[in-house]
Image (cartoon, coloured by chain):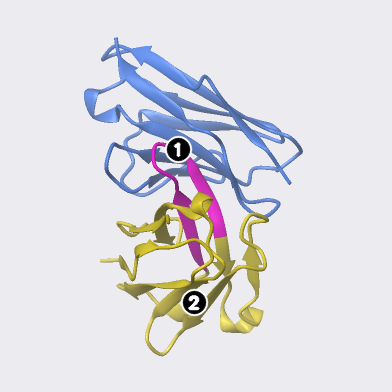
């Protein structure tokens, strides 16, 4: 099974910050990685598909990058509405989510 | 608009069975692979099952944690997807989401407790 390890598990941030979070796959998954945002009490929402493609309606401050085993989600100019838990998902070998990165206000 | 509406959750005892359902609308259901993903209280997301489309022989895939106990199925004529859960364990307690990955339902809670 492919393990997806997200880091950090939590981050304390300020509005306006540039935020970078990572996801490392235990084996090569190509670019078969999505990123999801889940706000408290809500269902997850797709942000990025295929490692670097922004989904419809997602603000351009969200950027995904990476291939192989190392992936990054960057939020430039963090907004209060971006406070959430972010998950990566690989779908190269079945489907595996990372453990999540929680963004909290300083 | 795409809508996925889950139903059928509830409280069951260990070793019992439960079938949850998902009604889909707003897209061509028969062309879409369907997934169930769960989230235990306060925990992260866990993929549970996937079912492909008729041209792909309705192939099914399961997480190791549920293989042999859960069965995913679909009825294209009704735009419905189901998850039959047998021999439930306390660790199956979770919110169960129906999803096409680009859109997610609101989830249905399944609680397994004696």
For this rendering, which residue is in front, A30 or A87? A87
Q: Residue at x 26, y 23 (%)?
A: A79
Q: Tell me the subunit letter for badge 2.
A: B
Label 1 in the same subunit as label 2: yes
A93 left or right of A34?
right
Residue A64 visible: yes
Relative to B63, is B52 above or below? Answer: below
Q: Residue at x 54, y 66 (%)?
A: B15
Relative to B66, is B53 above or below? Answer: below
Q: Check the rendered structure and report the hue given to chain A.
A: blue
Q: Residue at x 65, y 82 (%)?
A: B57
Pointer 2 residue: B31
Q: Check the rendered structure and report the hue given to chain B.
A: yellow
Q: Secondary structure at mark 2?
A: helix
Q: Which mark is residue A102?
A: none
Residue B97, image quadrant: bottom left
Q: Residue at x 50, y 54 (%)?
A: B92
> What secondary structure prevails in the magenta region?
strand
Q: What stretch of residues is rendered in magenta?
A: B34-48
For this rendering, which residue is in front, A82 or A66? A82
Residue B59 picture location, percent across and down: 65, 75
Pointer 1 residue: B43
């Amino acid at each position: 099974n492919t393990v997806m390890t997200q880091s950090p598990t939590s981050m304390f941030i300020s509005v306006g910050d540039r935020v970078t979070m990572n996801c490392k796959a235990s084996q090569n998954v190509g670019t078969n990685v999505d990123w999801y945002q889940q706000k408290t009490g809500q269902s997850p929402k797709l942000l990025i598909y295929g490692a670097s493609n922004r989904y419809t309606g997602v603000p351009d401050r969200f950027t995904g990058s990476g291939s192989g085993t190392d992936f990054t989600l960057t939020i430039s100019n963090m907004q209060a509405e971006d406070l959430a838990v972010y998950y990566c998902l690989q779908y190269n070998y079945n489907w595996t989510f990372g453990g999540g990165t929680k963004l909290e206000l300083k | 608009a795409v809508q996925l509406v889950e139903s059928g959750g509830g409280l069951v005892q260990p070793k019992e069975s439960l079938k949850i359902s998902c009604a889909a609308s707003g897209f061509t259901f028969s062309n879409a692979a369907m997934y169930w993903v769960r989230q235990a209280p306060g925990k992260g997301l866990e993929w549970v099952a996937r079912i492909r489309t008729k041209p792909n022989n309705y192939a099914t895939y399961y997480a190791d944690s549920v293989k042999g106990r859960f069965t995913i199925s679909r009825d294209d004529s009704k735009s419905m997807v189901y998850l039959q859960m047998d021999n439930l364990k306390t660790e199956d307690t979770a919110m169960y989401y129906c999803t096409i990955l680009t859109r997610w339902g609101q989830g249905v809670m399944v609680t397994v407790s004696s």
